[in-house]
Image: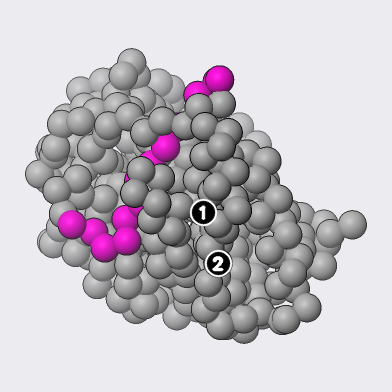
Amino acid sequence: MALRFAFVFAMVVSALLGQVPTSKIPGLQRVATSWMERTHIPALSISVQSGGQPDYAAAWGFSDLENSVPATPRTVFRLASLSKPFTAVAALKLVEAGKLDLDAEIQRYLPSFPRKQWPITTRQLLSHLSGIRAYEGDEINITRHYGDLMDGLEIFAKDPLLYEPGTKYHYSTYGFNLAGAVVQAIAGVPFATFVEQQVLQPSATLTMRPDSVFDLIPNRTRGYYLRADGQIQNCGLADTSYKLPGGGWVAAAPDITQFARTLMDEKLLNRETLNVMWSSNRLKDGSSNDYGLGWNNERRQGLRVAWHGGGQQGTSTFLIVCPERKISIVVLANLEGAPVREIAIDLFDEIAGLSK
């Protein structure tokens, strides 16, 4: 395997789509390739957008090790939980249209979902404050195919809430699945169709689509797992059809920054809605956390940033945006547990001029 990696990194593949300021490109390349070589990532794809400039996009390594298929910026990766911001934007499109009240009990829109000990709102679902449980047992490795989003709710629909909504933060992909079901019920069309029509097409996010195990998806990467002994193996099997809103899409890196640019340009949501989405939520005791509606929020050396990461079988993903500087950076790797957050932060510091 050591020889295999020597070959992979000797054959680094890179391609550009447009360019950020030329002076920044060597630093971006240095950050990406350094991390890749240290952490044995088979394929790494990045896209960087800054100040309204065209993207810089590059990819290194192999999207398919067994067949030596080079990665390119058009290589398509599983997004995992990077799907969640798209669900939040879809829901907020309905809010702006006057069709969804974030603070209404979800049974107003989804009467078939069982009532719990306390009422649940869509705002609580989108901010992980709902009390809906997370994965249990081997659920993250589900291989059953679900033909409809509603069918996937069967996994947790009958379970009690973990706590009173609004009192605690508990990360839950199932909560986002339920939020997606609310969107679907209001829209009157399949969740994927609504997202495609209202979010992806307006932002020209053209490679993003559901992660179907049956469809032939052009440029889709294979996924890998790094064992404790340093050996690379194919990742485990999973069918993500049960969790499209929470982690079931695929896309290429440049399309994710294209989505982020459109969002920051206020072409998907208005400024007031963006501020709500990118602001922390308050719990019932008056405290707040760093999660808004589908996004984590923080300040980095005085700059307000929003971000989300994801990880599942054969993939690691991370997106960070800085609205005031119009910066967006996405990092996609076809390796479970890859340090994509650290890579993205280093790239952000480089492009924002925060590097030491």
Q: CA distance from mark 2 to mark 1?
A: 9 Å
Q: Is residue 22 above or below residue 177?
A: below
The residue pinned by badge 1 equals 61
In this orientation, which residue lies closer to the viewer: 275 or 318?
A: 318
Q: Is residue 314 above or below residue 60?
A: above
Amino acid carrying label 1: it is: Gly
Q: Quadrant of residue 19?
A: bottom right
Q: Within 10 Å of the Cα at label 1, are there few (<14), some (14-19), or many (20+) other Cα atoms?
A: many
Farthest residue in the top direction?
Answer: 137
Q: Which residues are magenta?
A: 216-229
Q: Quadrant of residue 172?
A: top left
Q: Which residue is located at x 38 percent, y 27 percent?
A: 134
Q: Which residue is located at x 37 percent, y 71 percent?
A: 205
The residue pinned by badge 2 equals 14
**What predominant SS class does the magenta segment belong to?**
loop
Asked whether residue 148 is in view, the answer is yes
